[in-house]
Image (cartoon, rainbow, N blue to C red):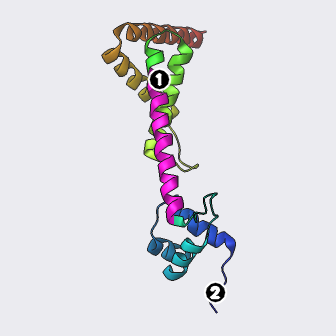
């Protein structure tokens, strides 16, 4: 009889296959589980849906990645809406929301940083502001002028508070 594995090991192997898109060979070398065992688990594990379809790891992987594509599309739409609203008004909250969305998108595209990585928040903020200003300058000159005016006012107020 073969080796007994904890359900935690099986779960981690499934997660690596489904969410991280690792191959059986990569999972095998990482977790020291034979490829044949992984293949067997991938076919046997899983719940049955209401239609009686077995949720193999391959089916779960495909569904996971389709969901991820939908989430990315929704995120892009949210980002577009925030930028459009920010460019049509002078509400500083909308402008900050747009900057926040842009920063989140950059973090997502760059991958997740380790908790120990030092983040230069000032640089990230300035890059976000620069991106927003370039967008507004090319798409809505009036909004660009309003945002520039507000940024100058904020800068002047900050300088005064530092002097006292």
- Tell me if residue 60 is in the magenta stretch: yes
Main SS of the magenta part reads helix
| Residue denoted by label 1 | 81
Front one among 76 and 112: 76
Q: Residue at x 59, y 10 (%)?
A: 161
Residue 93 in view here: yes
Image location (x, y in percent) of residue 12 = 60, 66
Image location (x, y in percent) of residue 105 = 46, 36
Q: Secondary structure at mark 1?
A: helix
Vertical position of residue 126 compared to residue 112: above or below: above
Vertical position of residue 49 compared to residue 113: above or below: below
- Tell me if residue 136 is in the magenta stretch: no
Vertical position of residue 41 compared to residue 138: above or below: below
Front one among 84 and 160: 84
Classify the position of the C terminus by image quarter.
top right
Quarter of the rendering containing residue 37? bottom right
How crowded pointer 2 is (Cα within 10 Å; few <14, some 14-19, many 20+) is rated as: few
Q: Which residues are magenta?
A: 58-83
Q: CA distance from mark 1 to mark 2?
A: 54 Å
Image location (x, y in percent) of residue 23 = 45, 69
Residue 37 circle label: none
Q: Residue at x 53, y 65 (%)?
A: 57
Q: Secondary structure at mark 2?
A: loop
Query: Are the two marked residues, 1 and 2, in contact with CB atoms closer than 8 angstroms?
Result: no
How crowded pointer 1 is (Cα within 10 Å; few <14, some 14-19, many 20+) is rated as: few
| Residue denoted by label 2 | 3
Q: Earlier in the sequence, mark 1 or mark 2?
A: 2
Image location (x, y in percent) of residue 102 = 46, 30
């Amino acid at each position: 009889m073969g080796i007994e594995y904890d359900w935690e090991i099986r779960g981690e192997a499934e997660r690596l296959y489904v969410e991280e898109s690792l191959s059986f060979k990569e999972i095998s070398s990482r977790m020291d589980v034979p490829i044949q065992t992984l293949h067997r688990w991938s076919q046997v594990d899983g719940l049955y849906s209401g239609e009686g379809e077995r949720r193999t790891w391959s089916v779960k992987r495909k569904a996971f990645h389709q969901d991820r594509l939908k989430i990315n599309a929704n995120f892009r739409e949210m980002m577009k809406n925030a930028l459009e609203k920010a460019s049509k008004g002078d509400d500083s909250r909308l402008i900050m929301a747009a900057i926040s969305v842009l920063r989140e998108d950059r973090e997502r595209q760059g991958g997740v940083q380790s908790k120990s990585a030092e983040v230069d928040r000032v640089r990230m903020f300035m890059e976000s502001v620069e991106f927003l200003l370039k967008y507004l300058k090319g798409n809505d000159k009036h909004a660009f002028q309003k945002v520039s005016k507000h940024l100058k006012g904020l800068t002047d107020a900050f300088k005064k508070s530092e002097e006292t």
